[in-house]
Image (cartoon, rainbow, N blue to C red):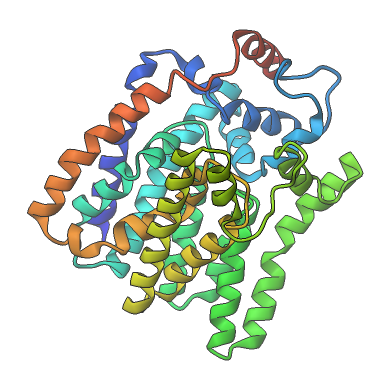
C-alpha cells in the first residue's frame, strides 16, 4: 500500500512539472487562468462585497462570486499565510494534485487491485485531457477528485460516516457534491439502513446550508448560488427537459456541439452500466446521478462537468484495459502526449485581461 502511494506521489509530481512547462517561471499565467482569479477573490473576501471591483471588465456584481463554492478558496487562504495569495494558489495546486493522486492509489488498490499502481495512476493523471489540465491549474477539480475518491474509499471500507463527511465537504467544493450525498443516502436506504441514511444525509447537508445562509446574509438571497448559475443562461434558464439541449443545438444547426454532447452522455451511461453489472454500486450510482443532472442542463461544457466522475469511468469501468500492461502502455503512449499538448496549448488561453489581472494583483495586496 505504501509503495502504491509513493508511486502515485512521484508520478503526480512529474505530471505537474510537465503541465507547468509552458509557465516557464511565469506564475501570472497560473493566476490569470480562469477560474483561478474568481477563487482568489473568494479566498480574500469570503464573498463580502468590496468597494472596488476586484475584476473590472469581467464581473459586474459581487453576487457573481457566489457560484464559486468556498472550500478550495479556504485551502488557498490557508496556503497563502506568509507568502501571499499568488504563491498560495501555486502551493494549494501542488498539494491537492499530490493528495488526490495518493487517495486515488488507496482507492484503486481496493477497487481495481488487478491494475498495477503505476499504470492505473498514469491513466488517472493523464486522462481525460481536461482533467490533466485542470488538476494542474488554480481550479477545484483536484480537491473535488480527492473528496469523491475519499468517499468511494470509505464506502468500500464500510465507513459510511467518513463517506458522508467527505461528501459534506464536496458540497462546498463544487455544486454537484450534493449528488455524492444523495447517492450515499439511496444506497443506505437500499440496504435498509434508513436511520444512518437520514442522519448522515442531514449532517452532510450542514456545510451547504451554512454557505447558503451566509449568502442570504450578504446578498439577501438564500439561493444566490443557483440564481447566478441560472443567469448565465442569458435569461432562458439553465434547466430544460432531459437531453433537450442536444435537440436545441441540433435545431440551431450546431451539429458538432449536439454530437459531442450525445457522445459524452452515451460514454458515461455505458460506464455506469458496466460498473453496475460489476457490482461497483457507489461509482455506478454517482455516474448515473451525473447523467441525470447534466441531461437537464443547458450547458455546452459538459466535458468539464463530468470530470467529477471521470476516474470511475476512465479507470474503473475499463480496468480490463489497464490490467494488461502492454495494451495499457500502448494506450497511454498514444493518449498521454495528446493530453500534455492539449494542456500546453490551453494554459496560455482563457486568461483574465491584463487590466483585470493588474486590478486583481492590487486587490490581493491591499
Q: Is residue 63 left or right of residue 124?
A: right
Tell me which residue sits at (48%, 71%) in the image: 285
Quarter-of-image position of residue 289: bottom right
Q: Nearer the viewer, residue 82 or 246?
A: 246
Quadrant in the picture for the C terminus: top right
Q: Is residue 83 visible?
A: no
Q: Residue 133: where, in percent of width, then height?
A: 40, 34
Q: Nearer the viewer, residue 283 or 263?
A: 263
Task: Reply above or below: 113 against 56.
Answer: below
Q: Residue 201: where, in percent of width, then height?
A: 67, 72
Outermost residue on the bottom side: it is 192
Tell me which residue sits at (74%, 62%) in the image: 206
Q: Is residue 253 visible?
A: yes
Outermost residue on the left side: it is 326
Tell me which residue sits at (59%, 88%) in the image: 193
Q: Is residue 85 left or right of residue 280?
A: right
Quadrant in the picture for the N terminus: bottom left
Q: Is residue 202 left or right of residue 316?
A: right
Task: Reply above or below: 155 against 25.
Answer: below
Quarter-of-image position of residue 11: top left
Task: Reply above or below: 285 against 79.
Answer: below
Tell me which residue sits at (43%, 47%) in the image: 259
Q: Residue 23: where, in percent of width, then height?
A: 39, 17
Count the marks: 0
Q: Residue 215: where, in percent of width, then height?
A: 83, 45
Amino acid at each position: 500500500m505504501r509503495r502504491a502511494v509513493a508511486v502515485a506521489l512521484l508520478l503526480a509530481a512529474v505530471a505537474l512539472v510537465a503541465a507547468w512547462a509552458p509557465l516557464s517561471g511565469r506564475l501570472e499565467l497560473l493566476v490569470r487562468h480562469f477560474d483561478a482569479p474568481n477563487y482568489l477573490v473568494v479566498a480574500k473576501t469570503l464573498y463580502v462585497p468590496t468597494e472596488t471591483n476586484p475584476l473590472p471588465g469581467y464581473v459586474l456584481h459581487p453576487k457573481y462570486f457566489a457560484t464559486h463554492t468556498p472550500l478550495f478558496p479556504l485551502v488557498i487562504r490557508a496556503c497563502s499565510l506568509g507568502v501571499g495569495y499568488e504563491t498560495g494558489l501555486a502551493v494549494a495546486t501542488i498539494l491537492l494534485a499530490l493528495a488526490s493522486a495518493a487517495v486515488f492509489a488507496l482507492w484503486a488498490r481496493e477497487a481495481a487491485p488487478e491494475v498495477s499502481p503505476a499504470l492505473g495512476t498514469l491513466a488517472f493523471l493523464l486522462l481525460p485531457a481536461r482533467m490533466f489540465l485542470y488538476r494542474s491549474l488554480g481550479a477545484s477539480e483536484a480537491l473535488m477528485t480527492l473528496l469523491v475518491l475519499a468517499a468511494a474509499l470509505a464506502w468500500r471500507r464500510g465507513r459510511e460516516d467518513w463517506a458522508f463527511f467527505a461528501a459534506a465537504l464536496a458540497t462546498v467544493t463544487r455544486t454537484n457534491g450534493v449528488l455524492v450525498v444523495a447517492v450515499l443516502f439511496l444506497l443506505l436506504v437500499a440496504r435498509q439502513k434508513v436511520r444512518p441514511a437520514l442522519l448522515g444525509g442531514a449532517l452532510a447537508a450542514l456545510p451547504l446550508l451554512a454557505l447558503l445562509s451566509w449568502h442570504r446574509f450578504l446578498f439577501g438571497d438564500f439561493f444566490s448560488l443557483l440564481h447566478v448559475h441560472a443567469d448565465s443562461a442569458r435569461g432562458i434558464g439553465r434547466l430544460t427537459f432531459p437531453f433537450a439541449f442536444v435537440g436545441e443545438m441540433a435545431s440551431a444547426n450546431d451539429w458538432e456541439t449536439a454530437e459531442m454532447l450525445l457522445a459524452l452522455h452515451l460514454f458515461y451511461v455505458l460506464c455506469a452500466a458496466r460498473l453496475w453489472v460489476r457490482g461497483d454500486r457507489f461509482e455506478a450510482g454517482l455516474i448515473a446521478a451525473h447523467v441525470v443532472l447534466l441531461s437537464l442542463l443547458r450547458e455546452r461544457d459538459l466535458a468539464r462537468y463530468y470530470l467529477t466522475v471521470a476516474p470511475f469511468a476512465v479507470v474503473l469501468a475499463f480496468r480490463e484495459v489497464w490490467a494488461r500492461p502492454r495494451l495499457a502502455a500502448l494506450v497511454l503512449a498514444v493518449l498521454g502526449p495528446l493530453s500534455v499538448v492539449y494542456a500546453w496549448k490551453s494554459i496560455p488561453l482563457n486568461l483574465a485581461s491584463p487590466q483585470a489581472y493588474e486590478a486583481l494583483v492590487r486587490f490581493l495586496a491591499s
